[in-house]
Image (spheres, rainbow, N blue to C red):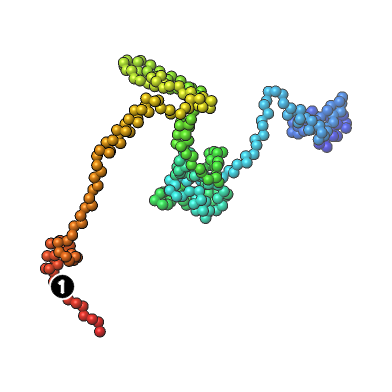
Amino acid sequence: EARVRACAARGRVNTTIFTSRAHADPSRTHATMGKSTTTSKPSAAAAAAATSSRMAPTGDVIPLKTAKKSTKHTLPRVIYVGHVPHGFYEAQMREYFGQFGDVTRVKVSRNKKTGKSKHYAFVEFKHPEVAAIVAESMNNYLLANQVLQVVLVPPEKVHEKTFEGTGTKFKVVPWQRRAAAAHNKERTESEQVKRNKGLVKAEDKRRAKIAAAGIDYDFPGYKSILKTEAPKTPKTKAAAGTTKTKNTKTPAKKEAVEEVKAEKKVAKAKTPATKKAPAAKEEPTSGKKPTPVAKKTRGALKRAQETPAKPAKKAKK
């Protein structure tokens, strides 16, 4: 460098030295004006401007988006419990697995209609180390005649709705009762007409299928039933008042009834009333009352005579 400076001061520059130094240190810039050559370092502002112009988007390159940091835990904290026995439900699982560590959530899969267990569940722990210990120690564990299957579930495989509805008591919905009430409810005239149209339409489709199959079969269906049924007309209060009349008998009917009554009275007067005599009480043949022994049968009497009487017990001293 001292040699280059001396040459520059004298006005003589060695081109070989200049080119070698320029290639060796590209950060330096050399400017030659006439017979003199100078070297200078770029400033920080110039370097920043050069880098920004170099990094500016030209349209040929699509800038990459910065990846968001995942908030999920990298280690699994949820375990799958299979072959769950009867009676080992949410409260029992929380109490049992709570011996290993803090349990945050428990979900036993149940049937939507009956509410009965499907015999598998998911348990979430606060710490992933505890979940790993539970999966290792409780897998193939015999509990209430059932071999438990306990496996760790990776975080990416845990569905967002896995623990939906935890902490709420399952209520059994009476689906059959609801369906029966909806089927047997009282319908208005318009609803009944709509229902009958649907029944007749479905019956016509059935008849068409039977005919398409080549079967000659006719049966009385909803059409014949609906024809025989009389349309129900709602009774108003005014109409009900006019239609209700007292049951008044005609004079011919009155005379006939009176004649029948008179005939019955005459027949009763002709036949004398015969009172039934009280039944005579059967008196015993002998004056004495029958003893309890006489009431017994012959076999009982013979047995009583044959068996000897037991000797009286001696009095204690």
Report which quarter residue 259 is drawn in.
top left
Q: Which residue is mark 1?
A: 309
Position of residue 271 relative to residue 95, above or below, is above
Q: Position of residue 15 (x, y in %)?
A: 79, 28
The answer to whether residue 97 of the structure is visible from this angle is no
Q: Residue at 12% x, 65% y: name it.
A: 302
Instruction: Please indicate whether residue 173 sits to the left or right of residue 29 in the image.
Output: left
| Viewer-closest of 13 and 100 | 100
Report which quarter residue 221 is drawn in.
top left
Q: Residue at 43% x, 45% y: name it.
A: 83
| Amino acid of disc 1 | Ala
What quarter of the picture does the C terminus occupy?
bottom left
Position of residue 169 relative to residue 257, above or below, is below
Q: Position of residue 169 (x, y in %)?
A: 53, 45
Looking at the rendered structure, the secondary structure element under dot 1 is loop
Position of residue 119 relative to residue 21, above or below, is below
| Viewer-closest of 220 and 87 | 220
| Viewer-closest of 205 and 317 | 317
Q: Residue at 36% x, 28% y: name it.
A: 255
